[in-house]
Image (tube, rainbow, N blue to C red):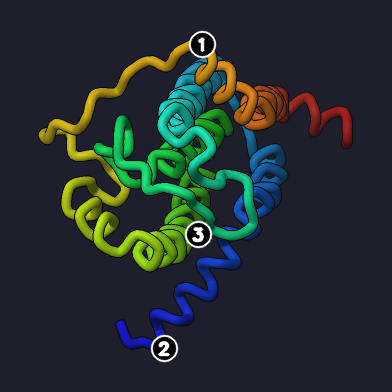
Amino acid sequence: MSSTQHSNVLKWGEKAYRFRSITPIPLLFLGIWLSEPSAATIIMGAILAFTGEIIRMLAMFETHDKTSTRGKVASSSALVTTGIYSYTRNPLYLGALFTGLGYMVITASPLMIMIFLTLFTIQYYLIIQYEEDYLRSKFPDHFNAFTRSSPCFFPCLKRTGSTITLPNTSLLRGALYRERSTILGLLVVISLLAYAPHIRAILS
């Protein structure tokens, strides 16, 4: 990749990072429009979605307040390499993949699943490039070592990372507080997609 191409990727990565909480909204409306759920797809989708949230929570237990998960620009006071981060450098985004895929499974629409996976791949490729450029510049020695020991996205289950320990009450309470809007949003989205046919009938 040339320096110009790399610069463009980082520029678009910064934009994708800034608007990452907004970009799923059009997909949600499209999902409600196309959703034809069954009991099986609702159950399977909800399991995937909650699995994603559990992965996010495991990441929150490690980061505490060291990294920005809601900010508009990348920010980190320390490089987190322990716990689930020793298995994947981007557990928050891995969790987002599971959750988003769970939503799409609820719709029972192969088209929605394909659209989601395509858009997710593009957006989070750009975001990860942007974030890793920031981390590499702020923690050059430690981050380069981190990239050699932990895969970028999908965990390598054959390797042994550091132990993932359960948090104490204080950390658990803090993680739940930081994720309160995400958990509420998860329940709302599952409900909207599960009852989408009824919503469409009311609005028609």
| Residue occupying image coordinates x 24% and y 24% | 163
Badge 3 or badge 2: first in the primary sequence: 2
Lateral position of residue 73 relative to residue 29, left or right: left
Residue 70, given in percent of the width and then of the height, sits at 62, 45
Q: Secondary structure at mark 1?
A: helix
Residue depicted at 26% across the width and 38% down the height: 86
Is residue 172 visible to us here? yes
Which of the numbered marks, if any, corresponds to residue 70?
none
The reply to whether the C-beta atoms of the residues labelled 1 and 3 are less than 8 Å apart is no
Circle 2: residue type: Thr
**In which quadrant of the rendered view does residue 98 lie?**
top left
**Mark 2 residue crowding within 10 angstroms, few (<14) / some (14–19) / many (20+):** few
Above or below, 13 relative to 36: below
| Kind of element beneath mark 3 | helix
Q: What is the x, y in percent for residue 116?
A: 51, 49
Can the viewer see residue 48 in this picture? no
Near-viewer residue (88 or 23): 88
Which part of the image, by quadrant, shows the N terminus?
A: bottom left
Q: Amino acid at mark 1?
A: Thr
Residue 4: numbered disc: 2
Check disc 1 and report the residue beneath it. Answer: 169
